Image (cartoon, coloured by chain):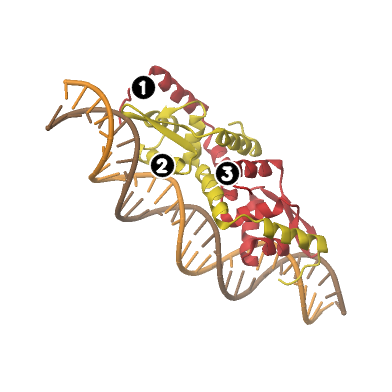
Chain colours: A red, B yellow, C brown, D orange
Amino acid sequence: MTECNHEEEHAREAERARANMPSEEEIAQVCAELKAISEPSRLKILLALRQGELCVYHIVQAVGGTQSGVSHQLRILRDNRIIKSRRDGQNIVYSLADAHVVAVLELACAHSKCEV
Amino acid sequence: MTECNHEEEHAREAERARANMPSEEEIAQVCAELKAISEPSRLKILLALRQGELCVYHIVQAVGGTQSGVSHQLRILRDNRIIKSRRDGQNIVYSLADAHVVAVLELACAHSKCEV
DNA sequence: GTAATATATGAACAGTTATTCATATATTAA
DNA sequence: TTAATATATGAATAACTGTTCATATATTAC
């Protein structure tokens, strides 16, 4: 890999992209949040929560799997502020954190051309 | 984990979420595409390509790292139809596959409250 | 044809992560 | 207080994934 035969213009674009590149911290932050969504067991939880808030028992009912497994995934989603929780008596009730989450899901599904 | 003390309504919501849950294949498809984006070295490539198409040499310049590493990441992005490529003489020129990709990036950055 | 350049790929290794099992914490009911 | 229920957590393991190194393929120039 040495020089490539492209026009000056492209070299300038590359330089600009390099100059505008966000910091490692910002990149890592965005990636962590996207990664939290990008996993089948967690995506199922998010899709279930689109209908409204649900307690852990009902989330397990909706997505399948074990209580422990779901709880671990909920923690990851919550740590990344994809979902939020509140206590309601004996239960913890979870819901989507904000509209961005819903919008990303819609877009991702649109890109996959699937009806989710 | 047995019954929970929520209203009937919530149980019905859980049932509805379960009934509306997409197939494992659809879930896996959406996850694979989101996961392709959710990685620092790949996200950098996508951010660089927002400015316009670039050949591999310039992508390496823009994001850093080795030629081999970048090439591996480009393959993952291309396999998931996040980016597309065309040959231009000796070079392979890459660009973002469609507007969905850009929109997801914008949303993810908005959620992270970072200026990307 | 050969040489040089641009890009891709296979294997190996290190680091990460999802799941399971057992157990802990917190709330409610008695 | 004790028992029961709802949820969370730590450790262990198996599977996955990003990176590196060496090498392969494809195009252009000679």
Question: Residue B27, how many percent across, how many down?
Answer: 57, 53
The reply to whether callout 2 and callout 1 are in contact (CB within 8 Å) is: no
Left/right of residue B36 with respect to residue B75 in the rendered view: right
Q: Amino acid at mark 2?
A: Arg
Is there any visible trace of residue A55 in the rendered image?
no
Question: Which tag is nearer the camera, tag 3 or tag 1?
Answer: 3
- The Cα–Cα distance between marks 2 and 3, rounded to whole angstroms, is 21 Å
Q: Amino acid at mark 3?
A: Lys
Decide which of C12, A67 is in the foreground and name it: A67
Question: Residue A40, how many percent across, how many down?
Answer: 57, 55
- The residue singled out by tag 1 in the image is A6
Question: Residue B110, how many percent across, how many down?
Answer: 65, 35
Crowding at dot 1, Cα within 10 Å, few <14 / some 14-19 / many 20+, comes out as some
What residue is shown at x 54% (from left), y 42% (from top)?
A28
Q: Amino acid at mark 1?
A: His
Is there any visible trace of residue B29 in the rendered image?
yes
**Rendered-image quadrant of the C terminus of chain B:** top right
- The Cα–Cα distance between marks 2 and 1, rounded to whole angstroms, is 22 Å
Q: Both on one chain, marks 3 and 1?
A: yes
Element type at mark 1: loop
Instruction: Give me the chain letter of mark 2.
Output: B
A33, above or below C25, in the image: above
Residue B91 location, quadrant? top left
A29, above or below B115, in the image: below
- The residue singled out by tag 3 in the image is A113
**Rendered-image quadrant of the N terminus of chain B:** bottom right
Decide which of B89, A10 is in the foreground and name it: B89
- The residue singled out by tag 2 in the image is B75
For marks 3 and 1, the one nearer the N-term is 1
Residue B69 location, quadrant? top left
What residue is shown at x 50% (from left), y 34% (from top)?
B97
